[in-house]
Amino acid sequence: MRLINTLLTAFALLSSTAAVAQVDAGDSVMNHAKGNRFSIGAYGEITYSRNFYSDHVSRYSQPENHKNDPSHGKFDVPHAVVFMGYDFGRGWTFGTEIEFEHGGNGLAYEKEDEEGGEWEQEVEKGGEVELEQLWIQKTFSRKANLRIGHIVVPVGLNNAHHEPLNFFTVYRPEGENTIMPSTWHQTGVSFFGRCGDFRYEAQLLAGLNADNFTNTGWISKGHKSPLEYDVANKYGVSARIDNYSVPGLRIGLSGYYGHSIGNSYPRNANGVDNTYKGQVVIGAIDFTFHRYNWIVRGQADYGYLGDAEQLKYIYNRLNSKSPFKHTAFVSKNAYALGIEAGYDIFSQIESLRRQDQQLYLFGRYEAYNPYASATKGTNYDYTAVKRIAVGVNYHPVPGVVVKAEYSKRLLKSLYNNEPSINIGVAYEGFFL
């Protein structure tokens, strides 16, 4: 019994340490437990949803015909992640994170709504298994760390803090998850550190690929490559700074700039690749407040895509067997706004508080649009979404949460709103 209690206490301490390390590191590979050279951990989610709206491919083009369509449900394992780290000594460390998406591997078939319901075999690097992180790091001091390899791009709240204990909803926040990659990970170089109440990070990365931009997802698939490598004809830079001056409050600013047209294979050196740049510019502000038994989180993201109107003509020149997207129009602008707040009602019950049990009642509101500006007079009004969610998060022990929520997407009056009930169980922590 003493051994079991010791192990449980150690696990709780490691989970607490992991949470702090996650905030400091700004990514999902947690720092090593003190005194251990090798560490292994994991996080993941198991979910169930019942969606009380149509899943027909023409539900937006012919909404009047699908107002009373039956509901549909699904079980899913959105993310199952294993991370490992090793401390070589003298400031040299290694970290890796492997993600299994939707419980599978290999290729997947998907029905592409933006292409008239055409069935496509989704070609992604590694299929449904992704190497989300793989890096070597040299720590010079708390203020200066150099990381080289496949790394998380911490632009926005969701990418910087994407583990399931860092948001109340069953699924990752929808707005940022729609307009930007999630989790955004690319190969590059990162320099970061902590100085007083500030944490900073600057990255040099391979550029995004405009061939993968879409009307309903903006740049969200731009970091993916169907090739055996990431094309780096063009480059991008990202930066993030967080402030912790106020107890319980973190405020962060982040951004990205890079060129996207011509960052593909094969490169047309004498054509549009040299004429147009496809500048991607993103600015984001986010915060987390955790004090007085409250957790409040919020973010605002705005994006600009230069030469967006040219992508239609670039797509038309793609071979029909090309693995890249063939969406006709992509918006010049996209945005995502969101805020959520939850209160731990178990904090008022001493016996449950002593057992480290928590029960948060929460609400969330967000508004987002991946097609915020019409290109060539073409509108996709159904992409303008407002979403509300209310629910509970129950933490029986540190590192485990049971989630339940009722949510509703509010669309423009032409379309049918989209209510749903979502239930999930998530975990996060060290095993060694």
Image (cartoon, rainbow, N blue to C red):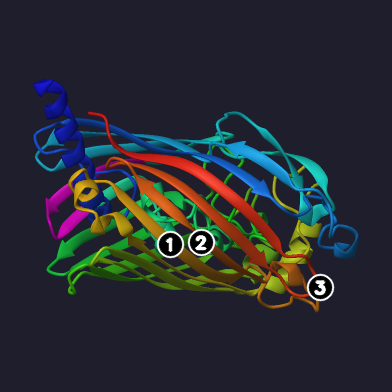
Q: Position of residue 219 (x, y in %)?
A: 59, 61
Q: CA distance from mark 3 to mark 1?
A: 30 Å
Element type at mark 1? strand
Magenta highlight range:
134-145
**Label 3 is placed on what type of residue?**
Leu
**Residue 362, numbered label:** 1
Q: Are marks 1 and 2 in contact (CB under 8 Å)?
A: yes
Magenta stretch holds residue 83:
no
The residue depicted at 19 percent of the width and 60 percent of the height is 193
Q: Is residue 218 above or below residue 79?
A: below
**Residue type of the residue flagged with mark 1:** Phe
Which residue is pictured at 82% across the width and 52% down the height? 57
Which residue is labeled 3 in the image?
Answer: 414
Task: Locate residue 123, reporting x and y percent.
Answer: 66, 39
- Check whether the beta carbons of the residues at disc 2 and disc 3 lie within 8 A of each other: no
Looking at the picture, tell me which residue is in the foreground, 418 or 269.
Answer: 418
Query: Which is more toward the observer, 27 or 168?
Result: 168
Q: Which residue is mark 2?
A: 390
Q: Secondary structure at mark 2?
A: strand
Identified at 53% across, 60% down, the residue is 180
